[in-house]
C-alpha cells in the first residue's frame, strides 16, 4: 500500500512540475527582434499583411514591423536569398522549390484559392472553353499562373484549330493597356488587376467588359478529384523559420487579418489604398469580394498542396524542385 502511495505521489509531483514548467514558459516574454519585415506583391494575398502592419499584430516580437512590395517571383527569390525579408506572400510552388533546393524555409498557410480571373470584351465568351481559336493575354512568364494554364491546356489536349492562342505579356499593366485600347479581347489577370481593368474601363466609358470565370472554377471542372487550388500563402524565410513561436504568431495574426478583410471589404480597401495609392478603393473592394480569401494552416492544406505538387511534378518538375517537400515544410 505504501509503495502504491509513493507511486501516486511521484506521479502527482511530475504533473505539477510539468505544469509549472509550462506556466513559466508561457510567462516568459517572446524573443524580440530588432526588425521584422513582411513582404508581398500588389495582389490580394498581401492585404492581410498590411492589416497586420497597421494593427501592430507582432508587437510582442518587434517594435519595428515593416512591409515591402516585390514585383516578381524572381525579385522575391533575391530578397529571400539576401535575407532582406522575413515573411512573405508567395505563390504556393515557390517555397516548395526553395525547400527542395536545400533552403530551410516553411510554408505557414494557404490563403488564396481563387485569385485568377478570365476577363473578356467578347460577350460570346462564357467560359475558358469558349476561347478555342481565340487569343488570351497571359501576363505571367514562368510563374505559377502560367504553369497552371499550361497544365489545363495539356489536360484538354489543346488540339490544332481549337488551340488557345496565348499571348504572353511582360506585366499585368501591359495586358491592361492592350485590353483598354481594344488590341486584345481576353485576358487572364490576378486580383486586384482584373478589378482594376474593369474599373478603368468603366471610367473611360469603354465597351462592356465581362468577368467570365475564375481559373479555380475551370480547374475544379477539369480536375474534380483536386477541386481546391491552393494558389498562394505566407512563407517563413530560412533565417526565421526555426523560430516556431514567431511563425505560429504570424500564421494566427494573418488568419485574423484575412478574416477582417473579408468581413470589412470597404475598410480593407481603404487601408490598401493608403499603402498602395495607385489602387483605387472601388477596384480593391470588388477584388476582395470576388476572391476566395480563406486562410488555412499549411498543415491542414497539405493534402491539397501535395495533390497540386504531384500534378505539377509530372510535366513541370522544375516548378517544385522535382519532388514533394518533407513533412516539416508544412507549417511551424
Image: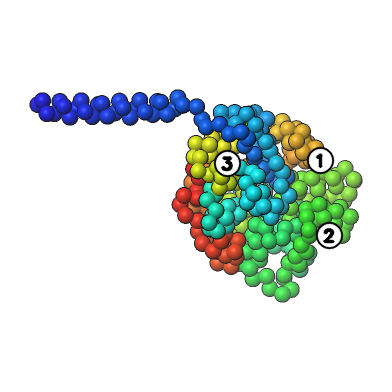
Q: CA distance from mark 1 to mark 3?
A: 26 Å
Q: Which residue is mark 1?
A: 278
Q: Left of 262 or right of it: where is 17?
A: left
Q: Left of 149 or right of it: where is 203?
A: right
Q: Residue at x 64, y 60 (%)?
A: 148
Q: CA distance from mark 1 to mark 2?
A: 24 Å
Q: Left of 320 or right of it: where is 120?
A: right
Q: Which residue is mark 3?
A: 295
- Residue 137 visible to an observer of this rendering: no
Q: Looking at this rendering, what residue extends furthest in the left direction?
A: 1
Where residue 58 appears, x then y in whole percent?
59, 31
Q: Quadrant of residue 321?
A: bottom right
User: What label sits on residue 184 in the rendered view?
Assistant: 2
Where residue 144 appears, x then y in whole percent?
65, 57
Q: Indicate the secondary structure of the residue bearing disc 2.
A: loop
Q: Relative to the observer, which residue lies in front, 83 or 89?
A: 83
Mark 1: give few (<14), some (14-19) or many (20+) Cα within 10 Å: few
How is the model colour-coded?
rainbow
Amino acid at each position: 500500500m505504501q509503495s502504491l502511495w509513493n507511486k501516486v505521489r511521484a506521479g502527482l509531483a511530475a504533473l505539477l512540475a510539468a505544469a509549472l514548467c509550462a506556466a513559466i514558459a508561457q510567462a516568459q516574454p517572446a524573443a524580440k527582434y530588432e526588425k521584422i519585415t513582411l513582404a508581398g506583391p500588389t495582389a490580394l494575398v498581401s492585404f492581410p499583411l498590411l492589416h497586420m502592419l497597421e494593427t501592430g499584430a507582432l508587437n510582442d516580437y518587434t517594435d519595428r514591423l515593416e512591409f515591402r512590395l516585390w514585383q516578381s517571383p524572381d525579385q522575391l527569390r533575391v530578397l529571400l536569398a539576401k535575407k532582406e525579408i522575413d515573411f512573405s506572400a508567395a505563390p504556393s510552388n515557390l517555397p516548395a522549390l526553395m525547400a527542395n533546393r536545400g533552403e530551410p524555409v516553411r510554408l505557414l498557410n494557404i490563403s488564396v484559392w481563387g485569385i485568377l480571373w478570365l476577363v473578356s470584351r467578347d460577350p460570346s465568351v462564357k467560359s475558358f472553353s469558349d476561347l478555342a481559336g481565340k487569343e488570351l493575354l497571359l501576363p505571367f512568364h514562368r510563374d505559377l499562373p502560367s504553369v497552371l494554364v499550361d497544365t489545363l491546356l495539356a489536360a484538354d489536349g489543346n488540339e490544332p484549330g481549337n488551340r488557345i492562342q496565348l499571348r504572353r505579356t511582360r506585366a499585368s499593366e501591359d495586358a491592361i493597356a492592350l485590353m483598354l485600347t481594344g488590341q486584345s479581347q481576353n485576358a487572364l489577370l490576378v486580383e486586384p488587376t482584373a478589378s482594376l481593368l474593369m474599373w478603368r474601363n468603366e471610367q473611360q466609358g469603354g465597351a462592356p467588359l465581362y468577368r467570365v470565370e475564375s481559373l479555380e472554377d475551370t480547374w475544379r471542372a477539369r480536375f474534380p478529384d483536386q477541386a481546391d487550388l491552393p494558389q498562394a500563402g505566407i512563407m517563413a524565410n530560412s533565417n526565421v523559420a526555426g523560430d516556431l513561436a514567431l511563425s505560429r504568431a504570424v500564421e494566427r495574426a494573418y488568419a485574423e487579418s484575412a478574416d477582417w478583410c473579408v468581413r470589412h471589404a470597404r475598410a480593407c480597401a481603404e487601408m490598401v489604398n493608403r499603402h498602395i495609392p495607385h489602387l483605387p478603393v472601388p477596384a480593391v473592394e470588388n477584388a476582395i469580394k470576388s476572391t476566395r480569401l480563406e486562410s488555412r494552416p499549411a498543415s491542414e492544406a497539405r493534402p491539397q498542396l501535395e495533390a497540386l505538387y504531384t500534378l505539377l511534378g509530372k510535366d513541370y518538375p522544375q516548378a517544385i524542385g522535382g519532388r514533394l517537400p518533407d513533412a516539416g515544410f508544412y507549417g511551424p
